Amino acid sequence: MAPPTAPDGAPSTGSDWDPAGYLRFAGERARPAADLVQRVGAIEPAVVVDLGCGEGALAAALAARWPAARVTGVDLSPAMLAAAARHAVAGRVDFVAGDVRDWAPAAPVDVLVSNAVLH
Ligand SMILES: C[S@@+](CC[C@H](N)C(=O)[O-])C[C@H]1O[C@@H](n2cnc3c(N)ncnc32)[C@H](O)[C@@H]1O
């Protein structure tokens, strides 16, 4: 029987992401996004959104970079959102279900990040 997900945690047809498999390569995956985020010039963004946030590590890094910001991660995968919940901080970092194809912000966003989703 075929495994439900690829070794890197990506879903096969009809299955969800596997956060544990995805995290096997967390270091390699995080590096480009971390480099990119360091180049964002926003000084004190109030609202930061991570579209396709996966297991939430990047959203957590964004919250660490901008401690006064409210950071929201949006993802379609129930498994990834469940894994991301460990990075939630009441009133500061939250994770919500949503589809980036029809997502629209409820209020103006200062920094919008999306890593390894639109490919
Ligand atoms: C390769 S992972 C990237 C996760 C994270 N951005 C990171 O940098 O580690 C792709 C993520 O995009 C999410 N995703 C794919 N299509 C999506 C969509 N249409 N709407 C929301 N999330 C989506 C998947 O559920 C998965 O968590």
Image (spheres, rainbow, N blue to C red):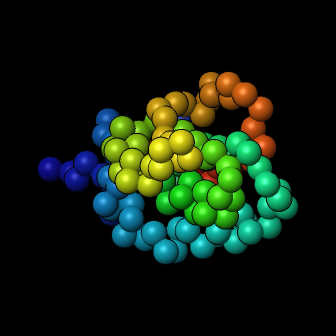
Residue 101 visible from this viewpoint = yes
Left or right: 35 as drawn, with respect to 88:
right
Residue 105 percent coordinates (x, y): 68, 29
Counting the numbered discs, the total is 0
Q: Residue 67's quadrant in the figure?
A: bottom right
Residue lying furthest left in this view?
1
* Residue drawn at (60%, 34%) of the image: 100
Residue at figure coordinates x 32%, y 35% from the top left? 14
The residue positioned 69% from the left and 59% from the top of the image is: 66
Q: Is 27 or 45 nearer to us in this picture?
A: 45
Q: Percent from the top left, x then y, of residue 80?
A: 39, 47
Instruction: Judge whether 92 appears above or below 28 on screen.
Output: above
Looking at the image, which is closer to me, 99 or 105? 105
Q: Is residue 76 left or right of residue 101?
A: left
The vertical placement of 101 against 34, above or below, is above
- Name the spot of residue 49 as percent of width and height, x first: 65, 43
Please say whether residue 62 is visible from this viewpoint.
no
Foreground of the two, 10 or 63: 63
Determine whether 73 is above or below 106 in the image.
below
Q: Position of residue 13 (x, y in %)?
A: 35, 39
Q: Residue at x 78, y 43 (%)?
A: 110
